[in-house]
Image (cartoon, rainbow, N blue to C red):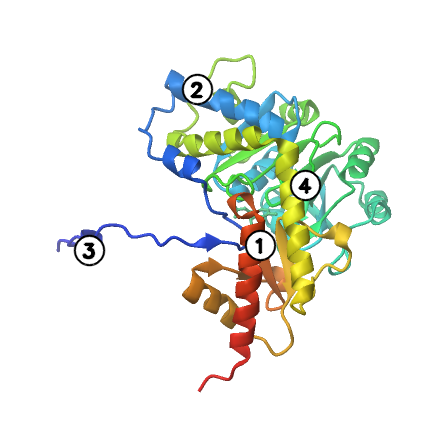
Amino acid sequence: MEVPPPEELMHPLYVPNKTLMGPGPSNGSQRVLDSLSNPILGHMHKECFQIMDEIKAGVKHLFQTENVATMCVSGSGHAGMETAFVNLVEDGDVVLLACTGLWGHRAAEMVKRVNGDVRYVESRFGRSLSIKEIEFAFEGHKPQVFFIAQGDSSTGILQQNLKEIGELCEKYNCLFVVDTVASLGGTEFLMDAWKVDMAYTGSQKVLGAPPGITPVSFSDRAIARIKARKTYVKSYYFDALLVGQYWNCFEAPRIYHHTISSTLLYGLREALAQFCTMGRKNVIRRHQECSHRLQCGVEEIGLEMLVPKANDRLPTVNTIKVPVGVDWRKVSDYAMRKYKLEISGGLGPTAEQVFRIGLMGENATYERVDLVLNILHEAIQSSKIPEK
Ligand code: PMP
């Protein structure tokens, strides 16, 4: 029996134009979108290598690092997370995971798969972790690796004390891994000054590039730990020494490791170029000002932020309590149906409890803040009217 071509594929592709103000991806700029229609290049062509070198320089600036082992892995943010653990964890290593929301638990799913010994330090709901709480956990667990998300997009919590955590990790000879997928570009991050050993971020959040390519960086200390492993890294695809060789990070000549998507490189290159042109500090300031405007507006329309302390609030992904008697799904559906605007519900520990509003990249403007506030207010009012 022959399988016929599907009828659906006889029509051209249609993609609606939505305003993406959930926790990511954010909307790409016209410059990024235009770059995606460039011709495809071979993954070993010199022009492709040139773009990779430019991206590497941009990522070093983005992370504020001079690490030679700065590169990208092919995959979304989860690929960055997987890269951290497959490289840095060996059987039986104690890995202490900070949980200020979902992401510490998601990290556990990866650490378990590489036979790491998972331990947790959990914050109180809606709060970041104090250095005292973390040090207490270090004393009890004596971890080889410590993980934290600078911004937890499920709860909207920002962890501010990374510099002190870096010092703690040094004192305990522990590798320091930071997830900056949701936070980078929306808040300060100084990889070298804060003694971070491994960091990764998302291309599709503040940067506004397509998902599928993830900047990662390893300190010299982390690379030395990988070189001293007794066993092979349990993933070929995410082996930092091999990917790093393809990205020309080490003295060795470039190798063919995998066929990188040149298209995704174009998008990321242009997103980084825009970030550099606008200025790192200006981008961060704009995200913080937008979040502040949103928080004030939220109060004005009688709503409440989930995170009680303003200092603990992540500017990029803002969590707002769903008022009693309101069904968040109806609100979200209304905004999408009527305005093609994405407002998300909660995730993990905040499921059913919050709206999550992303102010990232193209959507971190006062106009977008006012738009989302107006639509949120209207959608909540309309969801209260009983349906006939
Ligand atoms: N970490 C954090 C903090 C995130 O917000 C996300 C994406 N929401 C991820 C990791 C995973 O990224 P991705 O969905 O691109 O795999």
- Outermost residue toward the left? 1
Mark 3 vs mark 1: give the one in front.
1
- Quadrant where the C terminus sits is bottom left
Mark 4 vs mark 1: give the one in front.
1
At 72% across and 35% down in the image, what residue appears? 176
**Callout 1 amino acid:** Val
Residue at mark 3 = 6
- SS at badge 1: helix
Which numbered disc flags the more N-terminal residue, 4 or 3? 3
- Check disc 3: other Cα within 10 Å, few if <14, some if 14-19, many if 20+: few
Residue at mark 2 = 49
Query: Is the CB atom of the residue marked by disc 3 within 8 angstroms of ligand 1's nearest atom?
Result: no
- SS at badge 4: loop
Q: Position of residue 316 (x, y in %)?
A: 62, 48
| In the displayed structure image, the side of residue 232 where residue 159 appears, left or right | right
Which numbered disc flags the more N-terminal residue, 4 or 1? 4
Q: CA distance from mark 3 to mark 1?
A: 42 Å
Q: Which mark is residue 120?
A: none
- Quadrant where the N terminus sits is bottom left
- Check disc 1: other Cα within 10 Å, few if <14, some if 14-19, many if 20+: many
At 39% across and 16% down in the image, what residue appears? 46
Q: In which quadrant of the rendered view does residue 143 lie?
A: top right
Residue at mark 1 = 369
Query: Is residue 36 in sight in this rendering?
Result: yes
Residue at mark 4 = 187
Q: Are marks 4 and 1 in contact (CB under 8 Å)?
A: no
- SS at badge 2: helix
